[in-house]
Image: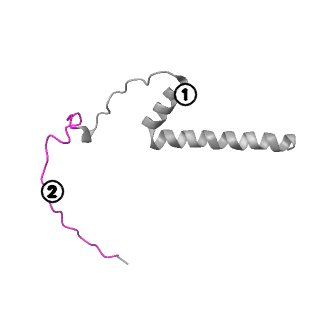
Amino acid sequence: MSAYGLVEFLVIGGALLLSAWSVLGQFAPRLRARLLSALTGQRPAATAKAAGCDTGCSSCNGCATTKPATEQPIRFVGRQS
């Protein structure tokens, strides 16, 4: 293998590993945190639960008051020439 081939292999391989690590962080952040803690030998940091409408905490007051859905009429307006 030539020096150019070795450098090319290292650059492309590094780019692929970096992009895979980034995608893993986007789609599986807990798994990436566990892998990182296993690789470094440290315990994972405790994370706080995210507050949102689906957590049931009523932080956004969106789940506290549920309004019945009302129908709204649709009015079509023709083009004017």
Residue drawn at x 82%, y 44% is 5
Residue 40 screen position, x and y as percent: 54, 24
Depth check, mark 1 against mark 2: the one in front is 1
Is residue 33 placed above or below 1 in the rendered structure? Answer: above
- Which of the two discs, 1 and 2, labels the residue nearer the N terminus? 1
What residue is shown with label 1?
Answer: 39
| The C terminus, quarter of image | bottom left
Q: Residues within 10 Å of mark 1 (few under 14, many from 20)?
A: few
| Foreground of the two, 61 or 72 | 61
- Check disc 1 and report its element: helix, strand or loop: helix
Q: Residue at x 57, y 43 (%)?
A: 20
**Most frequent secondary structure within the magenta stretch:** loop
Residue 4's label in the rendered image is none
> In the image, which residues are magenta?
56-79
Instruction: Give percent across and percent down for residue 2.
Output: 87, 43
Residue 54 falls within the magenta-colored stretch: no
How far apart in space, not on screen, are marks 1 and 2 (Cα)? 51 Å
Residue that mark 2 sits on: 69
Q: Secondary structure at mark 2?
A: loop
Most extreme residue toward the bottom is 81
Q: Amino acid at mark 1?
A: Leu
Figure quadrant of residue 28: top left
Mark 2 nearby-residue class (10 Å; few <14, some 14–19, many ≥20): few
**Which quadrant of the figure has residue 71?**
bottom left
- Name the residue type under label 2: Ala
Instruction: Give the residue displayed 34% in from the left and 76% down from the top.
Output: 79
Looking at the picture, tell me which residue is in the foreground, 28 or 64.
Answer: 28
Residue name at image x 78 percent, y 43 percent: 8
Q: Position of residue 15 (x, y in %)?
A: 66, 41
For the N terminus, the image quarter is top right
